Image (cartoon, rainbow, N blue to C red):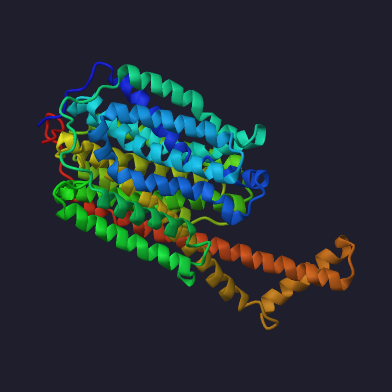
């Protein structure tokens, strides 16, 4: 069965779904910079306040794979409107939270509603455009996905500094009301959408909730709890593996599974999911590492760190629109391969950083990152679903966004752990050379003492202690620089791992993309 040929209000529908996507993705990162302020408001510890982030991510992960079933059971328009309303109301409740427990509860509601809203946005956008314009539909959807994480810390920091932290949630209210009005007025349900047959497979629901929920807990809290040195983390890992395994088994054997995994038999879909997971792994890792590098080692303010990322977002939008215009005219495998290569080149440029690296160099490296993301996102989001039956597009969109989210979570967890381990390694190696037998070091040490003594106004013993502290700080700084270089080198390899899966992508037919 072919996909509908689009609607007469496709651009308004695209704006509507973009607003919902942007709002949801923005909330994954907007609260991060406000955590210290929330910590003071609720007199909470660091471990307690991080549940504001973790609860949202866990709820998001749980709902994503079953969104397609929910859309078929209740109707995509009805589900989308419901999620918009609940997300907006939960934003109001989060900002007005009288206790930390209430705030975390509101964040869970936000995560559940937002997690279902994003795949529905993707499916509704694809259905609003004729099949030959699905590249443009994917580009429009991608704008909301990409700009959310970029603007989140910047917007959150500015609002927290100039207003108060509740406003990071309350800004969702006018956006949510506008999106609800537009969706109610212009979104239409496809005629082919039918309710799922048979009873609800509650076992699949339980298995996926336990599996993905514990996986997110494992990834988001593992580093803080020293990974497998903690029995709690071991339990998270065991339940995650068991839940996901049982979910896959149930999905393959149940008469009416909650999630139809048969779409993974299509090589372009399976390959596309692998690509989006790998790219998201590197994308989110780099997105976290670069601001850390420029703020901790180069002295950038949070605002300037956010501005540094902005040109990359603009480059992504330009690349996505350009790719959408040439879809069907250029082999998508060449486009995606060029995107993966651009991402790897960006990481390679970041490998060359030092403590004197300027803003212009970093912006250039990040622009290649943005271009690569645009070249990958649109073709994969489009080609991966070209042969998916229309009734399963919602499920396919859920899996696409699940791979994107989990790839990012795994990437952040691995990169953060790798960064800390390499910093310890390099600090130990550099400290081995800080000995009385290192002539060059001792010459520098004496010179430092002599330069400090006449200016510091301290006695010789204090000057000696101060100079030793300065030398240790420099060793620490150099070790962190080397660890950042190591992690960026690791990301070069990660992005190149996407190249073999590019071969699974089929080029669209000359007349456009056709779903069978």
**Quadrant where the image shows the C terminus:** top left
Q: Is residue 109 visible?
A: yes
Residue in the image at 15% along x and 30% along y:
512
242 relative position to 30: left or right: left
Q: Nearer the viewer, residue 311 or 104?
A: 104
**Residue 342 image position (x, y, % from top left):** 35, 47
Which quadrant would residue 154 be assigned to in this image? top right
**Quadrant where the image shows the N terminus:** top left
When the figure is inspected, residue 461 is found, relative to residue 117, above or below; the finding is: below
**Residue 322 image position (x, y, % from top left):** 30, 32
When the figure is inspected, residue 75 is found, relative to residue 421, above or below; the finding is: above
When the figure is inspected, residue 202 is found, relative to residue 321, above or below; the finding is: below
**Residue 422 image position (x, y, % from top left):** 50, 67
Q: Nearer the viewer, residue 207 or 345?
A: 207
Residue in the image at 79% along x and 71% along y:
465
Residue in the image at 21% along x and 50% along y:
271
**Residue 163 image position (x, y, % from top left):** 65, 31
Q: Is residue 324 visible?
A: no
Number of labels in the image equals 0
């Amino acid at each position: 069965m072919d996909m509908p040929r689009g609607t007469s209000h496709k651009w308004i529908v695209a704006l509507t779904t973009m607003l919902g996507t942007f709002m949801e993705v923005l909330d994954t990162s907007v609260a991060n910079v406000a955590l210290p302020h929330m910590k003071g408001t609720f007199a909470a510890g660091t471990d307690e306040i991080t549940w504001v982030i973790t609860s949202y991510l866990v709820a998001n992960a749980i709902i994503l794979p079953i969104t397609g079933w929910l859309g078929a059971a209740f109707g995509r328009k009805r589900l989308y409107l419901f999620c918009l309303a609940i997300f907006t109301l939960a934003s109001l409740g989060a900002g007005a939270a009288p206790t930390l427990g209430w705030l975390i509860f509101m964040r869970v509601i936000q995560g559940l509603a937002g997690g279902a809203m994003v795949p529905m946005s993707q499916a509704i956008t694809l259905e609003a455009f004729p099949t030959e314009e699905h590249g443009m539909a994917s580009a429009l959807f991608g704008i909301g996905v990409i700009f959310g994480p970029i603007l989140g810390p910047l917007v959150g920091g500015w609002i927290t500094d100039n207003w108060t932290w509740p406003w990071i949630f309350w800004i969702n209210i006018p956006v949510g009301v506008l999106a609800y009005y537009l969706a109610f007025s212009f979104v239409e349900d496809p005629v082919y959408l039918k309710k799922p047959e048979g009873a609800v497979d509650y076992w699949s629901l339980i298995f996926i909730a336990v599996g993905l929920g514990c996986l997110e807990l494992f990834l988001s809290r593992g580093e803080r709890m020293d990974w497998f040195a903690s029995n709690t983390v071991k339990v998270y890992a065991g339940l995650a593996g068991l839940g996901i395994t049982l979910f896959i088994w149930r999905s393959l054997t149940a008469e009416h599974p909650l999630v139809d995994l048969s779409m993974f038999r299509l090589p372009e879909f399976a390959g596309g999911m692998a690509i989006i997971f790998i790219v998201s792994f590197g994308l989110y890792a780099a997105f976290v590492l670069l601001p850390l590098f420029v703020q901790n080692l180069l002295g950038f303010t949070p605002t300037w760190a956010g501005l540094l990322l902005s040109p990359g977002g603009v480059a992504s939008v330009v690349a996505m629109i350009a790719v959408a215009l040439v879809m069907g005219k250029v082999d998508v495998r060449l486009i995606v391969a060029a995107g993966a290569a651009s991402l790897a080149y960006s990481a390679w440029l970041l490998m060359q950083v030092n403590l004197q690296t300027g803003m212009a160099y970093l912006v250039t490296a990040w622009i290649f990152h943005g271009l690569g993301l645009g070249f990958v996102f649109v073709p994969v989001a489009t080609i991966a679903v070209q042969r998916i039956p229309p009734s399963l597009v919602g499920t396919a969109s859920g899996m696409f966004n699940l791979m994107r989210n989990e790839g990012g979570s795994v990437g952040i967890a691995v990169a953060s752990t790798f960064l800390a381990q390499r910093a310890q390694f390099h600090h130990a190696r550099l400290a081995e050379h800080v000995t009385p037998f290192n002539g060059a070091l001792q010459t520098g040490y004496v010179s430092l003492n002599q330069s400090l003594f006449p200016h510091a106004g301290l006695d010789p013993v204090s000057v000696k202690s101060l100079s030793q502290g300065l030398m240790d700080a420099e060793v620490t700084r150099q070790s962190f620089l080397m660890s950042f270089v190591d992690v960026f080198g690791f990301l070069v390899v990660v992005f190149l791992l996407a190249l073999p899966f590019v071969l699974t992508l089929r080029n669209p037919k000359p007349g456009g993309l056709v779903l069978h």
